[in-house]
Image: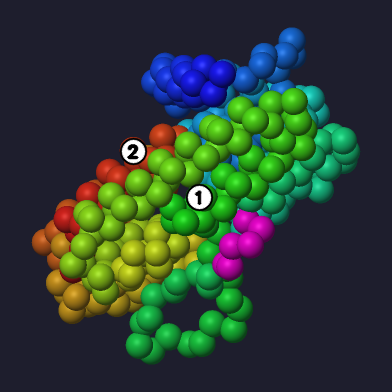
């Protein structure tokens, strides 16, 4: 009797191992599919990845800021507003990105039944880094840096919030969502280890970016982000000279720009410091692969 039970348990664990091996490429086990997909709205592409990793094909994800657009200035289309009015859940970044600041009250009016998840809950916001130009007047207003998702630690918190939201709007699939979420958190932990390896020995180094989207990444890996842009504006000629001086002083040879947002001033600075402009994308959908690529690019441009 006991022997049979053990044999049965062994069979059962083999079955689990086999089925775990059959999990598809996306790393999602299939959720019970319902007739009408849940609609989940997110603000930016990395969040779409987070939702899909947890919910698989079980939800339709609508992304408010399309590829190539800026979350600091984008306005939703009428089609997006229609999707919003049918959605069960909105996962906002929550850290003060312009599209949310401008839209959330409208969105609440449009679809009062929709659950709103704040992915930034529990994440401590940093002040936006501004250039430390020697002679600059004091900034009396401290804008907070909204780019929380560029740190894998923060991404894990965002994934937990999305998971909790999904379970609330779709409790039937809780078990599947939990398993998928745990798998994805494990992948994010692996990513963190990978980035640490890529950047080992570079702690305390600086990298120069046009648009300062990488403050939380820098914080997690003990790097210093040196921004060109000042409070979302093109630098003045004087600011440019300060940035050039700073780059020379730190021996910086690379200016990172956001994919699709190449700027004349970044090119001009690169020419002055005999360096180059390299694109990195803080808004790519494929979060894990992208961040490991970014770490490799940063490693080459650190100084
Ligand atoms: Zn930004």
> Whole-percent x and y of residue 93?
62, 49
Q: Is residue 74 magenta?
A: no
Magenta region, residue range = 120-125
Q: Is residue 172 visible?
A: yes
Of residues 81 and 57, which is closer to you in this image?
57
Q: Is residue 26 visible?
A: no
Q: Which residue lies under the disc numbered 1?
A: 155
> Whole-percent x and y of residue 39?
70, 25
Residue shown at the point (62%, 20%) measured from the top left: 31
Of residues 241 and 97, which is closer to you in this image?
97
| Quarter placement of the C terminus | bottom left
Query: Is 171 placed left or right of 17 in the picture?
Result: right
Quadrant hosting residue 165 = top right
Q: Is residue 175 above or below residue 97?
A: above
Q: Is residue 124 above or below residue 137?
A: above
Q: Is residue 125 above or below residue 238?
A: above
Tell me the chief SS of the magenta region: loop
Quadrant hosting residue 116 = top right
The secondary structure type at the circle numbered 1 is helix
| Quarter placement of the N terminus | top right
Q: Which residue lies under the disc numbered 2?
A: 289
Query: Is 8 placed left or right of 269 in the picture?
Result: right
The secondary structure type at the circle numbered 2 is helix
Dots 1 and 2: beta carbons under 8 Å? no
Image colouring: rainbow
Circle 2 packing at 10 Å, graded few (<14), some (14-19), many (20+), is few
Quadrant hosting residue 112 = top right
Residue shown at the point (45%, 62%) measured from the top left: 216
């Amino acid at each position: 009797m006991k022997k049979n039970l053990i044999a049965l348990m062994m069979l059962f664990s083999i079955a689990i191992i086999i089925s775990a091996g059959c999990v598809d490429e996306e790393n999602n086990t299939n959720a019970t599919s319902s007739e009408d997909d849940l609609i989940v709205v997110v603000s930016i592409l990395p969040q779409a990845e987070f939702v899909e990793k947890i919910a698989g094909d079980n939800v339709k994800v609508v992304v408010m800021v399309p590829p190539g657009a800026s979350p600091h200035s984008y306005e939703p289309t009428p089609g997006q507003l229609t999707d919003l009015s049918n959605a069960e859940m909105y996962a906002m970044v929550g850290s003060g990105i312009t599209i949310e600041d401008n839209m959330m009250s409208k969105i609440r009016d449009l679809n009062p039944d929709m659950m709103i998840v704040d992915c930034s809950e529990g994440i401590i916001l940093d002040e936006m880094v501004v250039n430390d130009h020697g002679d600059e007047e004091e900034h009396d207003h401290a804008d907070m840096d909204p780019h929380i998702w560029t740190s894998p630690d923060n991404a894990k918190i965002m994934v937990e919030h999305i998971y909790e939201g999904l379970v609330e709007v779709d409790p039937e699939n809780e078990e599947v969502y939990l398993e998928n979420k745990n798998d994805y958190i494990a992948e994010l932990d692996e990513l963190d280890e990978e980035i640490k390896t890529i950047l080992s020995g570079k702690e305390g180094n600086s990298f120069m970016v046009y648009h300062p989207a990488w403050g939380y990444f820098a914080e997690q890996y003990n790097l210093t982000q040196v921004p060109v842009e000042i409070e979302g504006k093109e630098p003045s000629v004087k600011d440019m000279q300060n940035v050039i001086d700073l780059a020379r002083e730190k021996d910086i040879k690379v200016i990172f720009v956001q994919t699709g947002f190449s700027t004349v001033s970044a090119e001009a600075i690169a020419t002055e410091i005999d360096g180059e402009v390299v694109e990195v994308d803080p808004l790519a959908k494929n979060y894990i692969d992208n961040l490991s690529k970014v770490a490799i690019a940063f490693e080459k441009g650190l100084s």
